[in-house]
Image (cartoon, rainbow, N blue to C red):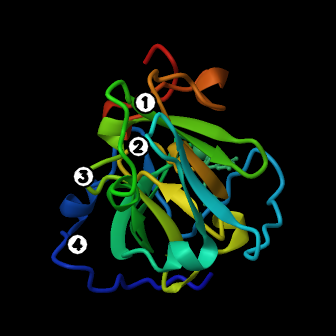
Amino acid sequence: MAERFVTRGFGGRPRSAVGLAARIPPGQHLVTDFPVLSAGPTPRIDLATWELALSGLVRAPVKWSWPEFLALPAEEFTKDISCVTTWTKLDTRWRGVSVDTLLEHVELAPNALGLVAECHGGYTTNLLLSDAVNGQAFVAYEYDGKPLPPDHGGPARLVVPHLYFWKSAKWLRALRVVDRDRPGFWESNGYHIRGDPWKEERYSGD
Ligand SMILES: Nc1nc2c(c(=O)[nH]1)N[C@H]1C(S)=C(S)[C@@H](COP(=O)(O)O)O[C@H]1N2
Ligand SMILES: [Mo]
């Protein structure tokens, strides 16, 4: 992927060295490439059969086909992302549907507490609803103005930029509403249940 030395003019963010440093969470370093990190092979996903489900503790579960998903109101998001392996990438540019928009289509049960992101290939990650609403998380299908590449989670992935990037589940197929914050794949393998980069919540016990 071609990277430019000069950053484009994303609205009003600080560009001085001091300003940039203030955007890098503790223990992280800046990258300009976009590393690929996957626990398994990149699945081949057919858009003709692709579905996104919103299921679990909702009155009536919803499923979107690819055309239905693309018809939902979408937004542009420009966000900094941090991977627990210590890279941080600034101003990543995505297009997708906010989790708020998805949740407008269901009625949550009173005991709804979290979401489990379920992926093609079996990967899962857990998220509190309080970390998923109010514009904090979205399901992206474009990166940098182009369809999201398969290695980066295309056709569509969850992006939760304020938490370590393992929470940003690639090849998303379902968001399941749950009443307990149970650990997903990495959270069951020694990583933190929440993963806030600014608090360095890397490993369970941090
Ligand atoms: N389905 C799925 N989602 C995943 C992963 C994975 O292995 N499978 N890896 C996670 C991890 S650890 C990171 S850091 C990011 C990496 O995303 P990228 O490959 O687009 O950089 O995806 C996250 N989402
Ligand atoms: Mo990661």
Residue at image coords 49%, 25%: 192
Q: Is residue 78 left or right of residue 46?
A: left
Residue at image coords 63%, 22%: 188
Residue at image coords 49%, 81%: 144
Instruction: Answer whether labels 1 and 2 touch (C-beta < 8 Å).
Output: yes
Labels 4, 3: front one = 3
Expressed as whole percent of the image width and height from the top left, the position of residue 1 reads 62, 81
Labels 2, 3: front one = 3
Residue 15 got which mark? 4
Q: Is residue 47 left or right of residue 18?
A: right
Measured in 3D between alpha carbons, the distance from the residue under mark 3 to the one under mark 1, in whole angstroms, is 17 Å
Looking at the image, is 199 positioned above or below residue 5?
Answer: above
Q: Amino acid at mark 3?
A: Asn
Q: Which residue is mark 1?
A: 194
Q: Is residue 108 left or right of residue 31?
A: left
Residue at image coords 75%, 42%: 122
Instruction: Answer whether labels 4 and 3 touch (C-beta < 8 Å).
Output: no
Q: Amino acid at mark 1?
A: Arg
Looking at the image, is 139 positioned above or below residue 87?
Answer: below
Q: Amino acid at mark 4?
A: Arg
Measured in 3D between alpha carbons, the distance from the residue under mark 1 to the one under mark 2, in whole angstroms, is 7 Å
Q: Earlier in the sequence, mark 1 or mark 2?
A: 2
Q: Which residue is mark 2?
A: 163
Residue 52 got which mark? none
Q: Earlier in the sequence, mark 4 or mark 2?
A: 4
Q: Earlier in the sequence, mark 4 or mark 3?
A: 4
Instruction: State the SS at label 4.
Output: loop
Measured in 3D between alpha carbons, the distance from the residue under mark 4 to the one under mark 1, in whole angstroms, is 29 Å
Indicate the quadrant where residue 85 lies.
Answer: top right
Q: Which residue is mark 3?
A: 134
